């Protein structure tokens, strides 16, 4: 087991050196600035006219969700792009030869890498999530309903995306992995929208298709659960959006995502064990 | 098997403990793949391999194995000392032991002055030295070196030679995969030639050249009749100008051959037997390069 922790440590250091991580953090700072200015304009506009505190709260809370959704998207993309190369790249360059011939089982190499990236992603999400919440609170005084649940679900979403990326890395080249991982994320995104069609369409086929997409890649459903947790029920029911709770993923969907992650990581270990390096 | 292509085939090989073993063969013969099978990087679809009495690729066997991959590379943000430390830890060494061992190894491979430099600025030769260092950090019982001298200057090649001999002196086995035959010739105890996945010859270089000698003689007035008579006694006799060349397995037959030539009325001015170089042997065994 010692090898696993050593590799997790070196992977975390490796991950922290990826330019893409720092670019994503920079993008987050930029988005946060835009977000703060937009909130500021909104608050100024509200102050200029009579308004029910209730409506005002709903609008500001909705804007907070926009900020958090941006933060979520950025985190998932960052997760995929930073980890895309870790197995695929090291296999193709032969860097892995010097590691895989050490007295460490391959599952430890894979799990170590996974844990290193998972730690990096958790820290990244924590920073961007709480910064967004803090900015919104400072400007509007609005807080999300269950921020801890929300943050944990976003971290879980990133970790599911990470496990898929690592699985792809055991078989495909870096570029193919990137295309497939982002493509699957697209499937998840589509699934989320299709499921919401149930709010105003009688077509059960569309909803089934949406659920199927969410089963193939359950990342977006974790976000939608996070959105549900963080909003007041009324705010969530207001619109057709990535944070609308027209069709809320159930606790079962969250449990499914957990099982999905374990399964994907298990398959990744089997595939890495079986392949020639 | 790679797709439908057979990689390596009926290879059969035994390496004794404590010897420096050279693994020779043309490009694409299956040398690197064979090493990878012994290390557990590649799984054979058939057959059996053992390293130190354990199945090839076994984690416990790997504890006693050091490996320098062909074209060694690693995270370029690590310093040389950090890289050795990391590999030592992966081999199960304590941080305490590594405090003394890392500088020792840096000294051994001649990059102690670059201990705190990042790999990013390293030349191919320096990386190769560092790769050798990580293979030796835990003083393994077997060291696999895949083209250890590629990218190295003459000083580096000498260092590798000295390091290899030092490994034998401490009782370790060295499995050397190289295409630099002159290197192999002066370092190895034993060599095996591999071609198309088959071991086609196995030679002990410690005993005198078992392949015999290449003889060059200056002979005047050699008749074709004598030349054809020679064909029955020596290998590949040729006579051009006044130069006669042929191969013999032992110098003991030379006096008889000279007597035969002299008796035919030819004049013998000079006879020079030379031990066959590994390169000649290689070309003879593997065949001339017909292109790949």
Image: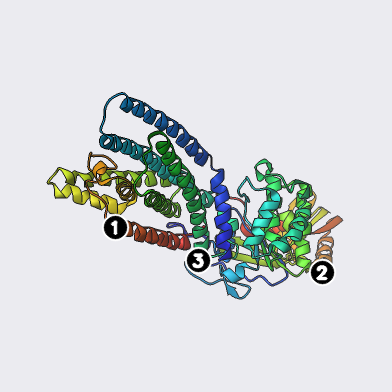
Label 2's element?
helix
Quarter of the rendering containing residue A140: top left
Kindly report which numbered mark, 3 or 2, lies closer to the viewer in this rendering.
3
The relative height of residue A181 versus residue B11 in the rendered view (above or below) is above
Distance (Cα) linking label 1 and label 2: 91 Å
Q: Is residue B49 left or right of residue A168?
A: right
Residue reaching furthest right? B269
Kindly report which numbered mark, 1 or 2, lies closer to the viewer in this rendering.
1
What label sits on residue B44 in the rendered view? 3
Q: Chain of mark 1?
A: A
Decide which of tag 3 and tag 2 comes sooner along the chain. 3
Q: Is residue B183 in sight in this rendering?
A: yes
The relative height of residue A112 versus residue A195 in the rendered view (above or below) is below
Does the CB distance between marks 3 and 2 fall below 8 Å? no
Q: Which residue is mark 2?
A: B252
Label 1's element?
helix
Residue at the (26%, 43%) spot, across then down: A236
Kindly report which numbered mark, 3 or 1, lies closer to the viewer in this rendering.
1
Distance (Cα) linking label 3 and label 2: 46 Å
The relative height of residue A155 versus residue B144 in the rendered view (above or below) is above
Check chain identity for marks 3 and 2: say if they share one. Answer: yes
Does the CB distance between marks 1 and 2 fall below 8 Å? no
Residue placed most toward the observer, B130 or B265: B130
Few, some or many residues within 10 Å of mark 3 (<14, 14–19, 20+): many
Check chain identity for marks 3 and 1: say if they share one. Answer: no
What label sits on residue A251 in the rendered view? 1
Quarter of the rendering containing residue A1: bottom right
Q: Is residue B133 left or right of residue A247?
A: right
Few, some or many residues within 10 Å of mark 1 (<14, 14–19, 20+): few
């Amino acid at each position: 087991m010692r090898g696993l922790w050593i590799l997790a440590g070196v992977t975390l250091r490796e991950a922290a050196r990826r330019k893409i991580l720092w670019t994503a953090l920079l993008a987050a700072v930029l988005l946060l600035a835009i977000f703060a200015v937009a909130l500021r304009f909104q608050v100024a506009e509200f102050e200029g006219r009579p308004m029910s505190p209730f409506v005002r709260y709903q609008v500001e809370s909705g804007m907070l969700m926009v900020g958090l959704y941006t933060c979520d998207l950025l985190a998932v993309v960052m997760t995929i792009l930073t980890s895309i190369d870790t197995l695929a790249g090291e296999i193709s360059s032969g860097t892995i030869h010097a590691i895989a011939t050490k007295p460490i089982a391959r599952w430890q190499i894979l799990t170590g890498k996974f844990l290193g990236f998972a730690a990096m992603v958790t820290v990244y999400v924590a920073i961007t999530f709480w910064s967004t919440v803090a900015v919104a609170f400072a400007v509007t005084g609005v807080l999300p309903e269950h921020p801890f649940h929300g943050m944990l679900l976003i971290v879980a979403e990133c970790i599911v995306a990470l496990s898929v990326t690592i699985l792809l890395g055991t078989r495909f080249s870096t570029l193919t992995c990137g295309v497939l991982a982002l493509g699957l994320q697209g499937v998840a995104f589509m699934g989320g929208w299709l499921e919401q069609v149930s709010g105003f369409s009688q077509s059960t086929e569309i909803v089934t298709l949406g659920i199927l997409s969410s089963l193939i890649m359950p990342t977006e459903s974790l976000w939608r659960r996070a959105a549900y947790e963080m909003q007041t029920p009324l705010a969530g029911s207001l619109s057709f959006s990535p944070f609308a709770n027209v069709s809320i993923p159930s606790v079962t969907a969250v449990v499914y995502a957990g099982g999905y992650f374990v399964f994907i990581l298990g398959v990744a270990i089997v595939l890495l064990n079986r392949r020639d390096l | 098997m790679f797709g439908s292509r057979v990689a390596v085939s009926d290879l059969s090989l035994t390496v004794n403990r404590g010897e420096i073993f050279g693994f020779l063969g043309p490009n694409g013969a299956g040398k690197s793949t064979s090493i990878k099978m012994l290390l557990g990087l590649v799984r054979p679809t058939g057959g059996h391999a053992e390293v130190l009495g354990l199945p090839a690729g076994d984690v416990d066997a790997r504890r006693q194995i050091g490996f320098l991959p062909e074209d060694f590379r690693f995270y370029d943000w690590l310093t040389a000392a950090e890289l050795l430390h990391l590999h030592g830890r992966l081999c199960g060494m304590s941080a305490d032991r590594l405090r003394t061992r890392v500088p020792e190894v840096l000294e051994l491979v001649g990059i102690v002055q670059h201990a705190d430099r990042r790999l990013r600025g390293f030349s191919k030769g320096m990386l190769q030295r560092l790769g050798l260092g990580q293979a030796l950090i835990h003083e393994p019982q077997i060291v696999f070196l895949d083209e250890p001298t590629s990218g190295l200057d003459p000083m580096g090649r000498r260092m590798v030679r000295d390091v290899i001999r030092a490994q034998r002196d401490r009782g370790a086995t060295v499995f050397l995969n190289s295409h630099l035959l002159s290197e192999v010739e002066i370092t190895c105890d034993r060599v095996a030639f591999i071609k198309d996945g088959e071991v086609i010859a196995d030679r002990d270089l410690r005993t005198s050249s078992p392949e015999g000698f290449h003889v060059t003689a200056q002979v005047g007035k050699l008749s074709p009749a004598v030349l054809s008579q020679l064909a029955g006694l020596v290998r590949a006799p040729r006579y051009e100008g006044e130069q006669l060349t042929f191969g013999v397995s032992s110098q003991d037959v030379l006096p008889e051959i000279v007597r035969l030539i002299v008796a035919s009325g030819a004049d013998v001015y000079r006879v020079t037997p030379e031990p066959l170089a590994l390169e000649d042997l290689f070309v003879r065994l593997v065949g001339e390069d017909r292109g790949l």
